[in-house]
Image: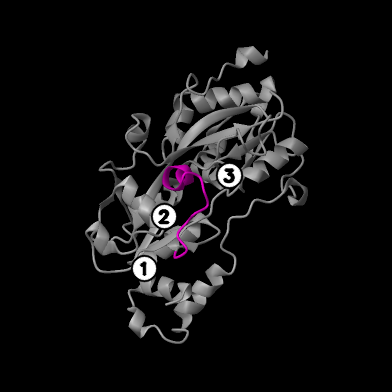
Amino acid sequence: MDRRHFLLAALTGLASSSSSGRAGTGLERIDALLADNVCRTRPDAIIRASLAPRKPGELRYQGTHILAHGAFRDLAAAYRGPRGYRVTVTGGGCDDGIATVRRGSAELGGMCCPVPGSRGEGLPWLLVARDIKVAITHPANPVTAASREELRAVARGRLDNWRQLGGEARHIALVTRKHCPDYFEPVRQLLLDNRPDWSPQGLYVDRDEQIVDLVARYRGGLGLVSWVFARPLVETGRLKVLRVDGVAPAAAEVQAGRYPLHGPLNVVYRQWEADSMRPFFDFLYGPQGAAIVARALVPVSAEEADYRPRRWA
């Protein structure tokens, strides 16, 4: 069975002996997803900012969509700065955030990978939250938990059947993104020692929304994705999350060091602008901002972020 037929069999439950020809629209959909399945890093020179000219006192954020959807849009809606200062939010990826900050078309650039070792190295930055990564599957799948070692084996292609996890005799269709391939990525580090040695039988897509959509549709799917994007489907019963090493994904478990799948969410900037930045970050690290961040992410304290605005005065 070739890779396309393997994926169709894994996602739909078809046996390999019955997979012949193109198997209709299902295999055509798999081909469409495989046609452009790597989350590529775009060089600064080809990124074009989509932000409008800056208004006096305004802060502009562009960068990782995890942070945009997970907190910054809600923070911007709730925040009222001095003299009516506001925050505008545009999503994208880590390189979008770095490029727009370096170019001066955004003051804040969001990153879902550590700054050291990235193209943002050398820019000042602040940790603003932590992202919870979850292993998701279809709610009809009887498996409820996996160990880190089992997830590592799936990611490397050494474990490919749900029966090996105590479930049905069904292929595991790993659905994920080859996320930030040339950066240090925390989940890839945990599962693959930061090498791009993902299973050749996996299905790699461009967007987190594709991960949750495919896994919600097909009983054989296993996805690795941010809780920001899994949460709506989990809460409506269309997905379920697996415990990892017996621990459920939750902010308290991440903060206690018990849940292993998580990563930092950072904001880079070019220079500290006290009039506009300090009121916003005071809000973000304060009680109201922390409550907003905690809706889908793990808040961090000003002390943990080493946020000391007086040092920039």
User: At label 1, which amino acid type do we have?
Assistant: Tyr
Q: Amino acid at mark 2?
A: Ala
Whole-percent x, y for residue 152 in the image: 38, 50
Residue 191 covered by magenta stretch? yes
The span from disc 3 to disc 2 (Cα, nearest Å) is 24 Å
Q: To which residue does mark 2 refer?
A: 155
Residue shown at the point (57%, 25%) measured from the top left: 281
Of helix, strand and loop, which one carries label 2?
helix
User: Per the image, is 229 magenta?
Assistant: no
User: Amino acid under label 3?
Assistant: Thr
Mark 1 crowd level (few <14, some 14–19, many ≥20, 10 Å Cα): many
Vertical position of residue 161 compared to residue 76: above or below: below
Residue 64 tag number: 3
The quarter of the picture where residue 107 lies is top right
Q: Are marks 1 and 2 in contact (CB under 8 Å)?
A: no
Which quarter of the rendering shows the N terminus? Answer: bottom left
Give the quadrant of residue 8: bottom left
In this picture, is 98 found above or below 176? above
SS at mark 3 in the image: loop
**What segment carries the magenta color?**
187-201
Q: Position of residue 280 (x, y in %)?
A: 59, 27
Residue at point 58%, 39% (across, down): 111
Which of the numbered marks, if any, corresponds to residue 124?
none
- Quadrant placement of the C terminus: top right
Mark 3: give few (<14), some (14-19) or many (20+) Cα within 10 Å.
many
- Which residue is identified by label 1? 218
Find the distance from the CA under tag 1 to the CA under tag 2: 19 Å
